[in-house]
Image (cartoon, grey):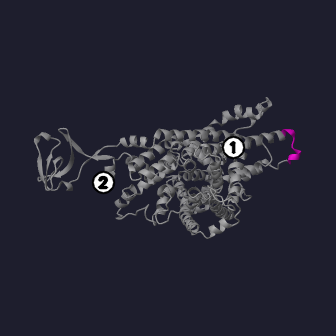
């Protein structure tokens, strides 16, 4: 399947659905099935909403049972420069009103009416501890400021972006060269080498990890970015495959014309292939950037103990180790970590999905 | 390695297209120049493959016969099969292998069936906005892994929405997902399902690649929905299902990062998350016993290889490459 064909199939959506008029029964089925899927989808995405809401709650709200789902605080009323909590108070006449408590007592308490504070206090018989409180919306944006400082977000963000950017540059450069070599040149053993390249996808990482780690320790690379960045400059199977498949779809006519004009392979790559391959280069770049952003294990083992050069995910995992009892702050950390990759995906979702389709379906 | 071309429909195709290659002795100067450039351009990968894949693989095997630790307090020496016999008698290793295999038995079928089912559903003519839904199903896949785990830690907690929902539908005492050895695997599987977006996309693309004539033929033959699924959809999707299965096996045998983040590598609750690779990770990273770790790694590699080769052998019976045969 060529890239073009795959893309066309990916995008055709409902094109092959028939245009004839539908019966009422069909519309009912469409409504039921679509609603069912939408419900599943909402459930599927609800953890993100949950995390976002939790990140804005105060610790006191989280520990309180039956508190509302939205980030809220117990309602208060400020009167004569002092804040008083508000309660639902059932009155002798059978109505329930929201009153602010000004004097707490075990068997009777004094309240004032926030709507009419100057009317004086109302004494209510009963224990105020049994009363429910109304809540008012109060997102704790402060949580974000707190976590921003606690994890030194600007530094972690800089590390993440720098690692992802350098890694992406290395990956795109090296994979482009390798893909160009596989797509445009005949040489002995090409098929075998390409098979070996693809086979590395199926190789469990554990079997190469230990000597690699040992050597990186011995040459003093552990505790630096080098173990994460240097291998990126030596190509990887997924991206080579993606680029090669695309290069194969670019007609050779222009290559040959340039060759006749005396252009060498480097010149052809720069002036003929590159200008035509930019869509796939953009795809691979965005792809690699998000993958590098989401790499956890590499930074975990190679940057352990070096908080000042760790990317967000490792910082977040460490933060969780210390602040796990404060779920709101942990969720702030999550939001700060997942924001950019999710945003990048939403902006470039077509490119993403195309890339997944090509590497997943064609191999 | 000669089994591998069967992995994918793509590899044999390249071979066919190129035809017999000329023996290098009789290569024309032009062809030799072309080959030189070819090797030049792929050289980054060749160097990288030798330095970061082949050499470490061989070194890992060599490590298993030595006594390497990171501190290397004893002098380096050949220890024969000591590491291997130690492993054979190490109850931790067998327990952790059991954990991994139990989890794999639960997760593998789900990891294949769920994305396939969702994709078949989205591909139905009764779903509107399938493209938008496909995109939204993909979102959690790009959520950084640690953030995803920590989101779910709260979702599955006492006050999380999962248990709130269960209470709403009448479950009085919903499970303590992350602290009960009987519920931790379902919890890990829920987190795994959250990342099936890529699987849905791949399955959906595969489904859309099935020629519609096949479905028309099935309809004319009077096949119902179930028969069509069994006799058209599944055989046509088998290369993709097989690819997902192989990658799934390789991944699940190495599974340990979620429990590492969730439980700080303690293996809680009650050792249920002491996965094989967690033990391996601790051996080389925490205890820095490189040779013993390498032995565990090669053993895992051996298991992976055996399982994959068996799956490849069985695949001839059910994986159908359209256009290949």
User: In this orientation, which residue lies closer to the viewer: A332 or B131?
Assistant: A332
Q: Residues under labels 2 and 1: Cα distance?
A: 57 Å
Residue B98 magenta-highlighted: no
> Label 2: which residue?
A64
Does A255 appear above or below B292? above
Residue A242 placed where, x, y %?
Answer: 65, 45
Read off the residue under disc 1.
Answer: A244
Secondary structure under the numbered disc 2 in the rendered image: loop
Image position, residue B38 (x, y; %): 77, 42
Disc 2 to disc 1: CB gap under 8 Å: no
Give the camera-side residue of B252 and B84. B84
- The part of the chain drawn in magenta is B23-30
Residue A244: % across, % down: 69, 43
Please give the chain letter of the residue carrying mark 2.
Answer: A
Q: Is residue A330 left or right of residue A200?
A: left
Where does the image place residue B60, in percent across and percent down from the top left? 68, 57
């Amino acid at each position: 399947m060529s890239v073009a064909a795959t893309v066309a199939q990916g995008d055709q959506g409902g094109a092959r659905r028939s245009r004839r008029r539908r019966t009422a029964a069909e519309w009912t089925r469409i409504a039921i099935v679509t609603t069912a899927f939408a419900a599943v989808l909402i459930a599927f995405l609800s953890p993100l909403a949950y995390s976002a809401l939790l990140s804005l709650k105060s610790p006191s709200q989280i520990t309180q049972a039956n508190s509302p789902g939205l980030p809220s605080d117990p309602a208060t009323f400020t009167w004569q420069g002092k804040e008083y909590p508000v309660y639902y108070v059932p009155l002798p006449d059978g109505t329930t009103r929201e009153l602010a408590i000004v004097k707490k007592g075990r068997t009777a308490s004094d309240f004032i009416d926030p709507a009419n504070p100057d009317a004086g206090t109302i004494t209510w018989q009963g224990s105020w501890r049994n009363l429910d409180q109304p809540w008012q919306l109060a997102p704790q944006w402060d949580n974000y400021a707190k976590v921003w400082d606690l994890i030194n977000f600007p530094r972690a963000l800089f590390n993440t972006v720098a690692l992802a950017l350098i890694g992406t540059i290395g990956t795109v450069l090296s994979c482009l060269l390798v893909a160009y070599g596989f797509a445009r040149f005949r040489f002995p053993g090409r098929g075998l080498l390409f098979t070996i390249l693809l086979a590395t996808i199926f190789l469990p990482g554990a079997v190469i990890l230990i000597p690699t780690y040992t050597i990186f320790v011995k040459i003093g690379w552990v505790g630096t970015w080098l173990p994460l960045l240097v291998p990126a400059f030596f190509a990887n199977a997924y991206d080579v495959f993606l680029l090669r498949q695309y290069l194969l779809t670019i007609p050779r006519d222009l290559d040959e014309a340039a060759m006749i004009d005396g252009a060498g392979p480097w010149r052809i790559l720069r002036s003929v292939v590159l200008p035509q391959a930019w869509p796939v280069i953009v795809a691979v770049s965005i792809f690699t950037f998000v993958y590098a952003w989401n790499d956890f294990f590499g930074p975990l083992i190679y940057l352990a103990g070096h908080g000042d050069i760790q990317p967000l995910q490792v910082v977040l995992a460490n933060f969780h180790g210390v602040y796990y009892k404060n779920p709101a702050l942990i969720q702030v950390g999550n939001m700060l970590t997942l924001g950019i990759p999710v945003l990048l995906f939403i902006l470039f979702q077509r490119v993403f999905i195309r890339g997944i389709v090509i590497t997943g379906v064609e191999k | 390695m000669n089994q591998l071309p069967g992995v994918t429909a793509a590899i044999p195709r390249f071979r066919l297209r190129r035809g017999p290659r000329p023996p290098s002795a009789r290569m024309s100067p032009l062809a030799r120049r072309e080959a030189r450039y070819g090797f030049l351009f792929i050289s980054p990968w060749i160097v990288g493959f030798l330095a970061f894949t082949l050499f470490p693989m061989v070194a890992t095997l060599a490590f298993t016969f030595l006594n390497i630790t990171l501190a290397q307090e004893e002098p380096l020496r050949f220890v024969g099969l000591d590491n291997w016999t130690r492993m054979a008698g190490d109850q931790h290793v067998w327990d952790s292998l059991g954990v991994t295999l139990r989890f794999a038995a639960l997760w593998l079928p789900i990891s294949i069936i769920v994305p396939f089912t969702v994709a078949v559903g989205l591909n139905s003519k009764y779903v509107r906005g399938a493209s938008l839904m496909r995109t939204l199903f993909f979102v959690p896949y790009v959520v950084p892994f640690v953030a995803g785990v920590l989101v779910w830690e709260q979702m599955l907690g006492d006050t999380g929405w999962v248990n709130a929902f269960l209470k709403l539908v009448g479950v009085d005492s919903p499970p303590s997902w992350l602290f009960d050895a009987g519920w931790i695997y379902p919890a890990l599987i829920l987190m795994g399902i959250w990342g099936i977006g890529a699987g849905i996309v791949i399955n959906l693309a595969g489904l859309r690649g099935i020629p519609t004539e096949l479905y028309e033929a099935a309809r004319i033959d009077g096949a119902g929905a179930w028969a069509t699924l069994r006799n058209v959809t599944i055989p046509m999707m088998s290369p993709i299902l097989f690819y997902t299965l192989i990658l799934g096996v390789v991944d699940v045998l190495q599974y340990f990062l979620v429990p590492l983040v969730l439980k700080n590598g303690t293996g809680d609750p009650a050792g249920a998350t002491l996965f094989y690779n967690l033990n391996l990770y601790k051996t080389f990273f925490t205890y820095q016993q490189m040779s013993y770790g390498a032995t565990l790694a090669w053993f895992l590699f051996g298991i992976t290889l055996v399982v994959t080769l068996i799956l490849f052998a069985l695949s001839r019976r059910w994986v159908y490459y359209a256009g290949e045969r």
